[in-house]
Image (cartoon, rainbow, N blue to C red):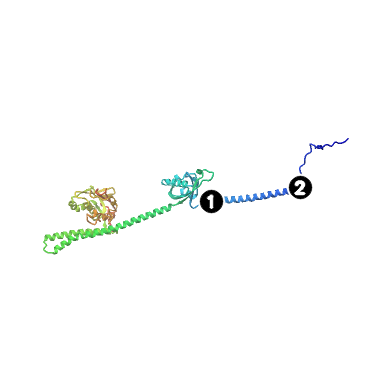
Amino acid sequence: MKRKVGVGVGRKKSPERRRSPRRVPSDALSFEHRRFTHELEIHQLELEVQNRALRENQELLEESRARYAELYEHAPIGHVTLDAKGLIREINLVGAALFGKAPQVLRALPMRPLLAVPSRRAFDAHLRACFTHGHASVVELVILTRAETRSIELVSAPRPAVDGEASTESAVVHSVMHDISDHKRNDAQREEDLRREREARVLAETANRIKEDFLAIVSHELRTPLAPMMMWVQALRAGGAGDALRARAVEAIDTCLKVQVAMIDDLVDVARGQHGQLRIARRPMDLQKSVGAAIEALAPSGAAKHVAIALEVDAEPAWVSGDATRLQQVVANLLSNAIKFTPEGGHVVVSVRSVGASVHLRVRDDGEGIPVGRLEHIFEPFRRYDSAQTRGHGGLGLGLSIVEQLIAQHDGKVVAESAGRGRGTCFVVTLPRLADGTRATGAAERI
């Protein structure tokens, strides 16, 4: 039997039979494996190098952060970071010390309440200038602490907002705080020294002018009694003078000499008093007697001006330890001064009262009075003579200075009281009181 052979007809493939993968030669597989392994090793080395570099950079960054933190915390000047609301974001040790608190206490607190009230508006304007205009600003502020107040100079520079963050959240100002308290105190002390130097210069110039005026007054007053004395001497030398004329001449010359001696004594007493050389002999005495003697001696002067002089005393003696002559001189100076500055028809009241452990002597008048600004200088020599009012009454005007010196020698004090010009004057002398007339404290002579 013949086999039929057809076109396109061949042997059927078995369905279980599949095409097997192409086999790669073993030498090519080994090459690819080595190449991949080599690349992996290279990548691994690169990663290790990169990791090493990252670790080194991280360490450097940590060191830099630590160094910055140390520099920030221990900087010799104060540093503070503020936000737009004035809250303290960061502050270093020196800055916190200026507020007298720890840094952790101040963080997140507003800075405004920590300032003195006058500085708060300046602080608000300072922050507005930094955030609005975006440039550095300087302001002086006063910090309130429990112990003291400190003056600081706040120098602030704004930091712009970081990309991706709201400006109100990230915008801050970095500020430096300089403690200028010592500088301020030095400036204030310098101004005070300059002010005192100017005052001292003015006082020295005033004192020199007053002394010059005083010397002019002294020369004038000392020459005043000399003119009538010379006139009477010339009259006596002319001859032909009768007994009556000679008697008048002698009386006039004697009066002028007494006036001149009294002025010279005042000058000597002031000089001795300034050097602590006034002589007093203290003994137990009744001050009322010295007051009465002084009033009796000056009664004619008061009568000539129609000035009424009244005396008010206690029923009991006013015992003090003093020099009767010197205390009579005190009363006479005060009373003479009151009569001199009291107009005609005026009144002068002299009183002696015992009050507790003291004896008070008051000489009160309703005369011209003393300006309030001159009361504290009224007892100073060379201080009164720039007043035309005083000069118009004549005399050297040393009586009150002598009174103060004599009362100080008697362990007492004297003050002047006046409500002003035209309101009268009252001089109050206070002396230690003796319990009785037998106790002679300080009886020894004082030089």
In the rendered structure, are the residues bearing label 1 and label 2 in contact, judged by CB atoms less than 8 Å apart? Answer: no
- The residue at the point 12 percent across, 60 percent down is 245
- With respect to residue 270, does 357 lie above or below? above
Disc 2 crowd, CA 10 A, few/some/many (<14, 14-19, 20+): few
Image x and y of residue 329, in percent: 23, 55
Residue at mark 1 to residue at mark 2: CA–CA distance:
62 Å
Comparing 242 with 74, the one in front is 74
**Is residue 414 among what the camera can see?**
no
- The residue at the point 71 percent across, 49 percent down is 35
Farthest front residue in view: 7
Residue 26 numbered mark, or none:
2
- The residue at the point 17 percent across, 61 percent down is 229
Q: Residue 112 sits in which quadrant?
A: top left
Q: Which residue is mark 1?
A: 68
Q: Is residue 4 left or right of residue 411?
A: right
- The residue at the point 73 percent across, 49 percent down is 31
| Type of amino acid under label 1 | Tyr
Comparing 234 with 88, the one in front is 88
**Is residue 211 among what the camera can see?**
yes
| Type of amino acid under label 2 | Ser
- The quarter of the picture where the C terminus appears is bottom left
Residue 14 numbered mark, or none:
none
Q: Is residue 235 left or right of residue 406?
A: left
Image x and y of residue 134, in percent: 48, 48
Element at label 2: helix
Between marks 1 and 2 in the image, the one whose residue lies nearer the viewer? 2
